[in-house]
Amino acid sequence: MLEGRLAARPSAVLPDHLQRQLACRQGYRGRYAPSPTGRLHLGNLRTALLSWLITRLQGGEWVLRIDDLDTPRNRAGAEASILSDLRGLGLEWDGPLIRQSERRGLYASVLSALRRQGRLYPCRCSRRMLADVSAPHGSTQVYPGFCRDRATGWGPQQGRLPSWRLRLQPGALLWPEQLAGSGSLQAETEVGDVVLRRADGFLAYHLATAVDELALGITDVVRGSDLWSATAPQVAVMHELAGEPPRYWHLPLWRDEQGQRLSKRDGGFGLDSLVAQGLDAPGVVGLMAASLQLVPAGTRLSSQELLQHCSLEALQTALQRQA
Ligand code: GLU
């Protein structure tokens, strides 16, 4: 059903070799994509467990991708601690570890192809200026399009390079959403032209993520509901590349019995602190599964045992109950 969706619509923008690189979707494939900005906390670990579980329940492959393009935010030792925590919980990934920092050539080629086709325009609006004038939509600012039709040029002006924005087509950006309501945002009023290359020269998260979901053949994206609105710009990029979005599972935030968001104080910390409190891997997996009422509180079980115990339908119902 999913196979061949990309091939159905050849891209007008991409040269053949790039098109082939982006059109390799086969079978089910999930991914977990942490940024190496510090230790994973309990909420991140639960997202990783659910991403692994949802993929394995469909007999799929699970890819681990390190989103390390924003180098100033990377922390020494964070990647090693992420790998060790995932292994510690029995969440083994398939294939080689993917690092976005090693894939810059692919993102840059896609960016150049889009630029050559006139799909991008240079933007010289500063963040501060936009904060003053943009209409906020939820927590995101919708770019008002000041530079859309301006001949601003691409070279440095007053010592600054422009950022590059994707010119969004008007209409709804839609994606298959498994948990968090319908996946739909209006391009003009709720999303706005998205930056694909920042003024400081960094390739943007939306570009790299959209390219990777296609190039790595991802069918199921499982991540926190805080990234729900990030989906629309990513879908817009995928459409430019003639790709169809994967299915999204935007997970509810972990709340305690009083409905409060899990904080550092009551468990937002890492696996090492839980181990120091006397919990081992089965204890931590049990804690995470019990938080979704998949098992009774106090249950100890391995990730593999949880996989045997669950069905995709039961998991989806449990997650929808909490959404
Ligand atoms: N790297 C992002 C983060 O750790 C998540 C990206 C994603 O799942 O799309 O917040």
Image (cartoon, grey):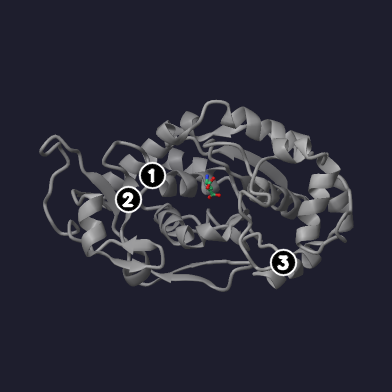
The total of numbered circles placed on residues is 3
Whole-percent x, y for residue 132 in the image = 22, 61
Q: Are the two marked residues, 1 and 3, in contact with CB atoms closer than 8 angstroms?
A: no
Q: Amino acid at mark 1?
A: Ala
Q: Is mark 1 within 8 Å of ligand 1?
A: no
Q: Does the image show residue 121?
A: no
What's the mark number on residue 204?
Answer: 1
Q: Amino acid at mark 2?
A: Val
As helix, strand or loop, the secondary structure at mark 1 comes to: loop
* Left or right for 97, reference 20: right
As helix, strand or loop, the secondary structure at mark 2 comes to: strand
Q: Say above or below: 69 vs 144.
A: above
Counting residues from the start of the chain, the first of labels 1 and 3 encountered is 1
- For label 3, the residue is 257
Of 271 and 110, the residue lying toward us: 271
**Label 1, label 2: how far apart the Cα atoms are:** 7 Å
Q: Depth-wise, is mark 1 or mark 3 nearer the camera? A: 3
* Left or right for 26, reference 159: right
Of 216 and 31, the residue lying toward us: 31
Q: Quadrant of the N terminus?
A: bottom right
Q: Residue at x 46, y 58 (%)?
A: 230
Counting residues from the start of the chain, the first of labels 1 and 2 encountered is 2
Counting residues from the start of the chain, the first of labels 3 and 2 encountered is 2
Badge 1 crowding class, 10 Å Cα cut-off, few under 14, some 14 to 19, many 20 or more, is some
**Label 3, label 2: how far apart the Cα atoms are:** 39 Å
Q: Does the image show residue 321?
A: yes
Q: Are the two marked residues, 1 and 2, in contact with CB atoms closer than 8 angstroms?
A: yes
Q: Amino acid at mark 3?
A: Glu
As helix, strand or loop, the secondary structure at mark 3 comes to: loop
Whole-percent x, y for residue 248 in the image = 59, 60
Q: Quadrant of residue 156?
A: top left
- For label 2, the residue is 195
